[in-house]
Structure formats: C-alpha cells, structure tokens
Amino acid sequence: MTGKYARHNAFLRLVSGNGAPLRSESRYSLLPSKEMIIGRDPSCQIVLDAMMYRMVSRRHAVVRPLSSSPDNKFSWLICDLNSANGTYLNGQRLQGCQELHSGDRIALGTDGPQFVFEHEHISQATIMTRPAAPLPSAGAFSGQSKSDSVSFTQLFPIISTGKDLTRKAYLVPGILTVVFVVLMFATVGQPQANQVIVASYIAFAAYYFVYQLCGKQKPWWVLLSVALGTALILKSPFLDLFIFIFRGILPGSLPSAQDSITFTELLVRMFFGAGLMEELLKAIPVLAALIIGILLPSPWRERIGIWEPLDGILLGTASAVGFTLLETLGQYVPVITQNVAQQAGVGTGQLVGLQLLIPRILGSVAGHMAYSGYLGYFIGLAVLKPRLIWQILPIGYVSAAALHALWNATGSINALLLVIVGVLSYAFLMAAILKARALSPTRSQNFATRFLGPK
C-alpha cells in the first residue's frame, strides 16, 4: 500500500529562564490533537519549577492546535491565561491569542523562562516495506552523531541572540565605552572637551549602577528629560529666586573663607543654603513628572509618572546627574582650573581640573544622587500611601537636606568624617532601593534579581 501522509514536528524548546541552568528535559513536543498548558500547577502539560520560576503563574499560558486545513497542515496558537506577569511573544505583550511561526520566542513575564517554537511540516510517500534499520555505529554508543552536528546559529551566535544582547549582555554600556574611548582619542589637546566626555561617561556609569540596583525599567528619554530639566532650572532665573529665599531670607548664607564660625553655625547654614535649597530644586522635575503622569492616559502615565518608590528613586537620581554635571563642569572645575592656571600655568591648571573632576563626579553616588534618590523614595512612597503624604514628604525632605548639609559641613573639617558621612549617605540610598524593591507592586518583574539575586 502506498500513499501520502503528513508528519508534523512541532515542539517548544526551553532556551533560558532567569539565569537558571537548563535541564535535559528542555524540549516539549506538541501534538495536533492536544493543547499544552504551561505553568507551575502539576496538572499542566508543561510544568515549570515553582521555586526556580516564581514569576510564572500556576496556569500561565496555553498552546492550542488549530483545525487542520485541506492540505493537511496544522498550526498552533499561543494564548495567555490571564497570568499575573503576562506572556510575551517576540518581545511584545500578548493580548488574547496569536498564531505561532517557527522561530517565535515566547517569554513568561518580562524576565521569566523563554521558549522557542519550532515547527516542521513534511509530506512524503510511504511504502509497504521498509528497509531494515541499520545497526547503530560505534559513534552512536559514544554520544556522537547528533551531538556533533553544528547549526548555523551556533557558528554565528550573533544572529540568534536578538534582544538578549541588550537585555542580558550589557551591550549598551559596552557601546558607550567604545564611543567614550574613540571620543577621548579624537579630542586629544582639547582639555574642555576631554572634561565633558570624562564627566559624562563617569556620570552614566554611576547612574547605570543605581539603575541596575533598582531593577525597574524606565524609558531613557524620561530620565534624560528630568536631568535636562534640572540643568535648565540651574541656568534660569529660578535659581536667583531660590538663592534669595534660602540664603537671603532664611539663615542659609554660605560663609566665605575669611569667616570664623563654629561647626554648629556652619551646619545650620548648610542645612538651609545647600540642603533645603538644592534638594527642593532637584525635586522640581521629579514632581513635574509625577503631575504629568497623573494627567496622561495609560500607558504613558506609567512610563512617565511616579507610581511607586522605585520610580521616585530613578527620577531623583537622574535629576541629581543633571545637577552634578552642570555644577561641576559649569562652576566648580572651571573656577579651580582658572585659579591654579594663574599661579602655576595653564597646563597645571588643566591637569588639576581633570584630577578634581573624576572624584567629584564619582562622589555623586554618595552625594547628590544619594540625597535626591532618597528624597525620590519618599515621593514614591507618598504616592503609594496618599493619606500619609504630609507625614512622609517632610521626613524625606528634611532627611535628605540633613545628609546634604552634613556632607558640606564636614568637608572642610576632617577627611575621616567626610568618609563616614559619604558611606552613611550611600547606605541610606541603598537601603531605600532595597525597601522600594520590597514594596514594589511590580516586584515579580524586577530585573535586579539578575544583578544581586532575589530580594
């Protein structure tokens, strides 16, 4: 008897899962007559480990076969089962069901296990008699044959990695580092350009560290807008108004080098003239993002606005980056460079300016970023608990201003005290990040678990 029959080789292949090692049972065959439910529930056809994949729902998604067509071809649908963290098809969140095509990548949650769908349809003649199966060769017993074959994507891995390059391989920091190096070579002999490039790169690295610790995605253009907003405020007439209020009306006038005052008086002046003034100034773009988010429809409101402490920390530290860069490049380093150049020559002044630039920007993690990020935590916390807003915000504002004032006041007294205050400020920021991650409504989607492990 001869004829035609169709053979369907369709399966899901587990390719990644929250950094966990893959097990040998990572390939799941799909049958044209049976749907496959994926989840943590033991009744599912594809059961995922509940401890390893906590972001996966008990019944997360299902792969359903479509009715056969006249040419005896089958296809499959992927459907989300109202999972808590969503199902993603090729990076896009799934709404309802969608037909699968060979090579499609299915992710359970933004950072959960991922499957690749592979489907092969073969039509071939059948014959009554088949040749006897060949005896297995020696290589089959030694684990060769299939294991020794090399696929095209194995030879050229960059073709198949796709979005994993940017999401899991830290490609963006690598690209920016290469750009930084090239720009440094291109601007040799231009000290001002060198200073801008070095400061921008160090500021990016410091902020990227905080961003990874927070573990919540926020559009880069939102973060950049907040940083630019703070820089524009510093260059606007609003700065003069702030100086008039906090250093003219309030007791925040900064002492000159000739003034002889006690540490307590210096601390009070720094509290009003630096702490309260600068932290409020840096908070303005953060509060503006909060208001804009409330007014916008979804999903723009979630992308731009502040809905939890992690949002506040990310925007607060971004504002601090804008403040630090403008203050350092536009005021602090140029003044020191000019003073040294007048006394020891232009070359020496430029060298001293670059030497001051590096610790100044690096110190922002334990300085401006720490204070503003800490205040941002309280802004986000007030959004989570609106009934306690008048209790939460004053505590955050005063705490951030006090840390700021303590840093400024101890800087002219003792280096050891300055180290202690810097470590304390950094500890305050890190504690706020860890608490914000614990309070986050989107905790299950937090990607910081790849950076520090589950928290």
Image (cartoon, rainbow, N blue to C red):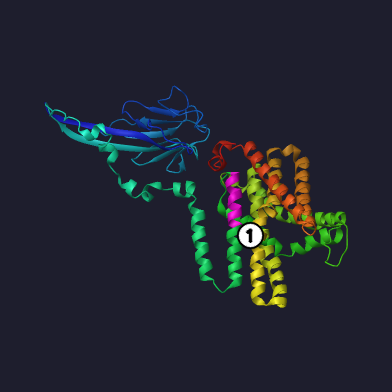
Q: Quadrant of the C terminus?
A: top right
Q: Which sits in the foreground, 322 or 410?
A: 410
- Assess disc 1: are there few (<14), some (14-19) or many (≥20) residues with their C-alpha within 10 Å of its C-alpha: some
Residue 325 x %, y %: 65, 61
Residue 240 placement: quadrant? bottom right
In the image, is 174 to the left or to the right of 201? left
Q: Which residues are magenta?
A: 203-214
Position of residue 131 measured from the top left corner of the image (x, y, whole percent)? 12, 29
Q: Is residue 207 left or right of residue 127?
A: right
* The image quarter in which residue 24 lies: top left
Depth check: give the residue in front, 345 or 160.
Answer: 345
Residue 212 counted in the magenta span: yes
User: At x 48% / y 46%, what residue is drawn?
Assistant: 168
Magenta: main secondary structure equals: helix
- In the picture, the quarter occupied by the N terminus is top left
Residue at screen point 71% across, 49% down: 425
Q: Answer whether residue 268 is magenta in the image.
A: no
Label 1: which secondary element? helix
- Above or below, 127 against 271 in this view is above
Residue under label 1: 228
Can residue 71 be seen in this snapshot? no
Residue 410 vs residue 304: left or right? right
Q: Nearer the viewer, residue 417 or 262?
A: 417
Expressed as whole percent of the image width and height from the top left, the position of residue 146 reads 27, 37
x 45%, y 44%: residue: 91
Residue type at the position of mark 1? Leu
Question: Could you tell me how many numbered marks the image carries?
Answer: 1
Which one is in front, 251 or 139?
139
Residue 191 as seen in the image, left or right of residue 15: right
Q: Is residue 161 visible?
A: yes
Report which quarter residue 10 is drawn in: top left
Residue at left offset 57%, top offset 36% = 454
